[in-house]
Image: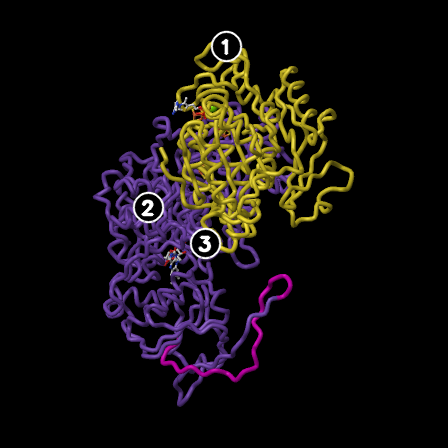
Chain colours: A purple, B yellow
Amino acid sequence: MKPTDISNPEYFHKVVDCQYACPAHTPVPEYIRLIAAGRYDDAYMINWESNVFPGILGRTCDRPCEPACRRGRIAKGEEPVAICRLKRVAADNKMDIRARLPKIPEKKNGKRIALIGAGPASLTVARDLMPLGYSIDIYDNQHAGGGMMRSQIPSFRLPGEVLDEEVNYILDMGVVSFFNTEVDSLKEVLDKDYDAVFVGTGAPRGKLLQLPGLEEAGKQVHIGIEWLASVAFEHTESIGKRVLVLGGGNTAMDCCRTSRRLGGEDVRVVVRSPFADMKASPWEKEDAMHEGIPIYDNHTPKEFVIEDGKMTGMLFEKVEAVYDENGKRSLVPTGEDLVFMPADEVLMAIGQENSFPWIERDIGIDFDKWDMPVLDATTFQSSNPRVFFGGDAAFGPENVITAVAQGHQAAVSIDLFCRGEDVSQRPDPYTNLVSQKMGIHEWSYDNSVENDPRYVVPLAPLEETLRNRKLEVELGFDQDTGFKEAERCLNCDVQTVFDAPRCIECDACVDVCPTDCITFTENAEEEEALRQRLNAPAGNLAQDLYVSTELPTRRVMVKDENVCLHCGLCAERCPTTAWDMQKFLYSVTKAGL
Amino acid sequence: MSYQIPKFRHPDLPVNELGYTRADYEGAISTLCAGCGHDSISGSIVRACHELNLEPHRIAKLSGIGCSSKAPTYFLGKSHGFNSVHGRMPSVVTGAAMGNRDLLYLGVSGDGDTASIGMGQFAHAIRRNLNMVYIVMNNGCYGLTKGQDSATADEGSASKKGDPNPFSAIDLPGLALQLGATFVARSFSGDKGQLVPLIKAAMSHRGFALIDVVSPCVTFNNNAGSTKSYEFVREHAEATGTVDFVPMREEITAHYAPGTGTEVTLHDGSVLHLEKLDEELDPFDRLSAMVAIEKHRAAGEILTGLIYIDKDSRDLHDVLETSRRPLNTLTEEDLCPGNKVLANINSSLR
Ligand SMILES: Cc1cc2nc3c(=O)[nH]c(=O)nc-3n(C[C@H](O)[C@H](O)[C@H](O)COP(=O)(O)OP(=O)(O)OC[C@H]3O[C@@H](n4cnc5c(N)ncnc54)[C@H](O)[C@@H]3O)c2cc1C
Ligand SMILES: Cc1ncc(C[n+]2csc(CCOP(=O)(O)OP(=O)(O)O)c2C)c(N)n1
Ligand code: SF4
Ligand code: SF4
Ligand code: SF4
Ligand SMILES: [Mg+2]
């Protein structure tokens, strides 16, 4: 194999598993160390720069970083660092950080931008462009900013104050907001001579299953996301005692848990797929079950049962999952009798769709066969160069952190576009690689590896949270627990950097490495062959091999990055400092930089 | 500075027949200098014991004084250990081995511990063919006392702070051959590929097995001008041939086609496969081995690999016809078999 090019920023970026997996590439280990040091403000600001909503995301993020976390694969049964809930520790314990927010220039740059929709995607664009002197108008049909974070995510997961605080940091930059304003023509907006328009209207349409009896069931059946919004906006305050929630995603989990708080006593989730295949995150399912909500899997809804003009329940067909040789699943009826479940009300949480009836089809924006706008996946520009998309409106429903990541990229594009530059010329990420050596065997990071298992976030008493739909269920880590959880982080951003000319091939690093990462061996043409020669099994192909240039014995150093603990022992035991521990900072460049 | 090795190990480490991973044969984190050859030898010992499926509690590791003699702390943390007096490890092993022949005795020593203060003990342990593995971590200096030339330092070799050594060196394998050793090998700490099979073979040999391992002292004797530096040894090492150790249960024929090398069946049934042997060296002939060592030395080369093995070695227990059972398992009945037996003995002497 060719020697690894560590000057390519993506090589070390990939070693920082959590940051690499985060759509916004938040420098996770950097903020975790700051939390351990009690520097909550600094930890908060690192997050705020990357993901804009640390307090919100520290409670609600889909956390793609956690399944990627190295900690979760260094031993059987070991769980990832509680990255998400540590973010909340920073947000909960910070002081007033308003003085650290970017200054907004009094003199504007003369460019006007319209943002349609005030969800996380649009707010991120505003966050990035306001400090550059843009004048921004934001339009939303709700009474306040936040988008689905306000209308969909229930208060028992995300308290209103936390949402308001972080939304207002942005609106207070001087964004001109037009709330309670439905935009029903994009052409009209374009006619107002904005220099650019960003569409961040989300995926606002819930799906409805057309089953026999639906019409007769009438108002006893609700679309999940519409019902959640009407609860959030206090139009709905109660629900029947027996509730069936159809669907297996996170919306279903929010619907059932909200039902429990609005008077539902026998609340059940019914889903077609097997339990393990459900779309909802494992922790969302756990939370629902903890609140006494059973999940019936492998049940396909067949019809509403109507008696005397009233819906009394639903019939389900039992199915089982059968997988063909390609692993493709089909749900095959078991042939058992249909199952009846009684219900006073039914919530359908079976997915959302985009819908753009308000975008004229003759204003230069192309739509594909699924009626989605045709976009450049990097720049988020549509075929009308003045119109950009981001968040759920761009490529379908995702989550808050994806909306934020896309908002950042769209802001870069809008800024380039407004300055008359090529939007496809993306700025390089900012990177920095600094030795952490402080003395012979001293590092400026805490290199010992803690053994503690993952800490569990404490919860408010169940009785109380079920009585009050606004009472937050999770209490968050206190500072002590936050410290201990932070210490579980392996500091994967502190890279093992190898300088081949210094190595005398004494094997000290090989001998000391607790996880057998390092091998000195003859090189091989193919990666697969080289993996076979390593001292320990190197079967995780998602993780790279770090290959050195040829050494005097004609061998190469090969390090399998997979289960490196970043403990620094190789560098401590190296007599020639051929290994050094160097902190790699990677930040995605923002608009205007 | 780290005082502990993290508890985590590679999650997919292979287990041996006893269900142990290599980690089960490790010891405490080393306090030797970073890059010390002795640590690599420790690493090779760990590998060899794991691959040989040895039960850690069936091994006793004994040493004298020196950086090398400290090394047993850094491997086989679950085995028996005895850190004795400078140069006196062989007599402690002799006592232990006489008392309990069921343990595997692994002596670890330095060139100072062996070739200076411990020379007398070393010589007699060999002469008696004590059943033990004797590893010399040979760095040509007294590392622990700051690098003075030792008796194995080559004439003309200079350590970091020293003048060229005016005395001729003691060649431990050569000396051992002369004293009647039944297994003699030399290796290099930086060549695990060679060292691990040699350790395994030595552990399977019945009788005294010496492995002289050149092991650079990075701090005091790894400079230009030293003949025990990483660089010098890499340039001047000449292997007798490759050695492979095949455990008894495996079929040797599955590994090698017939006629591709020489095979030696060891006492415990395991097999040594020797390939591409030095044309002039016959490792079963003591004289040939002695000649080979001297020839390479004269040519400025360090001969490594298996140098000599006596396939029919009889160890001290065989010679003395000692009790087959460890002394601590002998009961009063075994030790005082009664008047009848005494009377028989007495009558046999009349
Ligand atoms: C029940 C539920 C729970 C969720 N929970 C989580 C969670 O815990 N964590 C997570 O990361 N994600 C969660 N999500 C997903 C997340 O809310 C969205 O992915 C995210 O909010 C998308 O952001 P956005 O900026 O693209 O759009 P949105 O947040 O959808 O904001 C779009 C805004 O535009 C407004 N709008 C739309 N059309 C118009 C128009 N024509 N004129 C004016 N205004 C308009 C909408 O009313 C809305 O306010 C959840 C989603 C649902 C449905
Ligand atoms: C009886 C006695 N004499 C002298 C010493 C001092 N001393 C300690 S270690 C050592 C030499 C060790 O050299 P070596 O065996 O080569 O070990 P190394 O440190 O080089 O591995 C000496 C002379 C001692 N500890 N005890
Ligand atoms: S930091 Fe070095 S010693 Fe520690 S696990 Fe990684 S490669 Fe091994
Ligand atoms: S410890 Fe340093 S000098 Fe020794 S082999 Fe490793 S990198 Fe090379
Ligand atoms: S002084 Fe030399 S022999 Fe002793 S630990 Fe240091 S490098 Fe090894
Ligand atoms: Mg020595």
> Badge 3 local density, few (<14 within 10 Å), some, or many (20+)?
few
Of the pair A489 and A505, the residue shown nearer to us: A505
Q: Is residue B28 above or below residue A223?
A: above
Residue at the left extreme?
A96
- Residue behind mark 1: B164
The residue lying at 35 percent from left, 79 percent from top is A242
- Which of these two is toward me, A490 or A222? A490
Please state which amino acid type lies under the numbered disc 2: Ala
**A108 relative to A568 in the view: left or right:** left
Foreground tag (3 vs 1)? 3
Q: Secondary structure at mark 1?
A: loop
Chain bearing mark 3: B
Under circle 2, the secondary element is helix
Q: Is residue A218 above or below residue B179?
A: below
Element under disc 3: loop
Ligand 6 is within 8 Å of the C-beta of the residue at disc 1: no
- Determine which residue is flagged by label 3: B331
- Indicate the amino acid at tag 1: Pro
In the image, the segment drawn in magenta is A324-346
Magenta run includes residue B109: no
Q: Chain of mark 1?
A: B
Q: Left of A320 or right of it: where is B63?
A: left
Q: Mark 2 falls within which chain?
A: A
The residue where tag 2 is placed is: A486
Asked if badges 2 and 3 are on one and the same chain, I answer no
- Residues behind callouts 3 and 1 on a single chain: yes
Residue at image coords 68%, 22%: B292
- Kindly check if marks 3 and 1 are in contact, taking CB atoms under 8 A apart as contact: no
